[in-house]
Amino acid sequence: MSTQHELLSALDEFIVRMPKVELHLHLEGAIRPGTLLALAERNGVDLPARDEAGVAQLFNYRNFHEFLTVFMVLARSLTTGRDFEQVAYELGTHLAMQNVRYAEVMISPVQYHRRALDLDEVVQGAAAGFAQAAREYGVRVGLAFDYGRQFGVDLAWELLESAVRNMRHGVVAWSIGGDEVNHPPEPFAEVFAAARRAGLFVMAHAGEVVGPASVWGAVEVLGARRVGHGIRCIDDPALPAYLREQGVVLDICPTSNVRTGAVPGLNAHPLRRLFDMGVPLTINTDDPVFFATTMCDEYRLAARTFGFDAGDLAQLSRTGARAAFLPVVERDALAYRLDQEIAALRADLGV
């Protein structure tokens, strides 16, 4: 066996075994096709698919807006707290299999509000599922409300009240996602200010399919300390430097960006350039079932496509721990635990 092959094998084992943090993950994009079909049947929901192969076919969208449409169609299968408990438990189990120690999972509240579902039941069902996974596997999960910006500011205020009310059930953050092209972040400034006053952390999807102005707005106007995707910041030479200096973290999702057409291919993805510029980055799956990926797959991609070594990958994980929406003492404890485990693992594997 060649030395190079041995190093690659050891690095792959390091990726599998290393403790991880995932900060950009949508509950609705992490539901197994079989579970979607079972929930749809249980709840009398008519999906445009009759088997798992049909569900998989739905994932062959051609652009970001088609992706959003499919995302919303499949979310209709979830109707009761029991449903959310089931999918949250399954996701928690999956995260544990990837050696994820802590994750933040977004729920899209508008999808359920528009169908007159009880958002308290939605949150508490998901919290119960994640709590069971925590008891069984030790993976901890915080919840975030990810508001579809295309539904306007007025409804955002109403749903923010629900997010604040459910902080005691594990909601830690408020975010905006959805149609970035037609709905810039600035109109949501007061909503975000209110979220921060209530004790919620804030983040925003920005710079995924719109240029640097979207990221500037999210950071300077909304006060987001974490930006989902943010890859278009590379188009403004001043912006990566600003993010580095201010410690604003980009939650990067490479496979997602290719699958939704945010970048034409991995060779065009700025992951490596942003990392080399010193911008704080994390690696995430976004919608792992939709994009047929896992956290281990994303770390492998960083290693094999972008040349990240064990030290670089450890830095990504460490950044995730430091950027987690946790109280300072708990965040520091998580980072220390990861540092200790990773150091021991690197010594064991010689990477």
Image (spheres, rainbow, N blue to C red):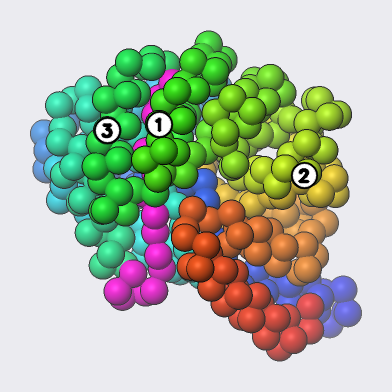
Q: Residue 67 placed where, x, y %?
A: 47, 27
Camera-side mark, 3 or 1: 1
Which residue is identified by label 2?
244
- Out of 6 and 57, give the one closest to the viewer: 6
Q: Quadrant of the N terminus?
A: bottom right
Q: CA distance from mark 2 to mark 1?
A: 26 Å
Quadrant of res 269: top right
Q: CA distance from mark 3 to mark 1?
A: 10 Å
Q: Secondary structure at mark 3?
A: helix
Q: Residue at x 39, y 74 (%)?
A: 138
Q: Residue at x 34, y 27 (%)?
A: 72
Q: Is residue 7 above or below residue 67?
A: below
Q: Is residue 193 visible?
A: yes
**Chain-order first, disc 3 or disc 1:** 3
- Out of 253 and 59, give the one closest to the viewer: 253
For the magenta stretch, what is the residue range?
A: 134-149
Q: Residue 30 placed where, x, y %?
A: 40, 47
Please, what is the three-letter code of the amino acid marked with disc 2? Arg
Q: Quadrant of the C terminus?
A: bottom right
Which residue is identified by label 3?
161
Q: Secondary structure at mark 2?
A: helix
On whether residue 81 falls in the magenta region, the answer is no
Which residue is identified by label 1?
194
Please, what is the three-letter code of the amino acid marked with disc 3? Glu
Q: CA distance from mark 2 to mark 3?
A: 33 Å
Please, what is the three-letter code of the amino acid marked with disc 1? Ala
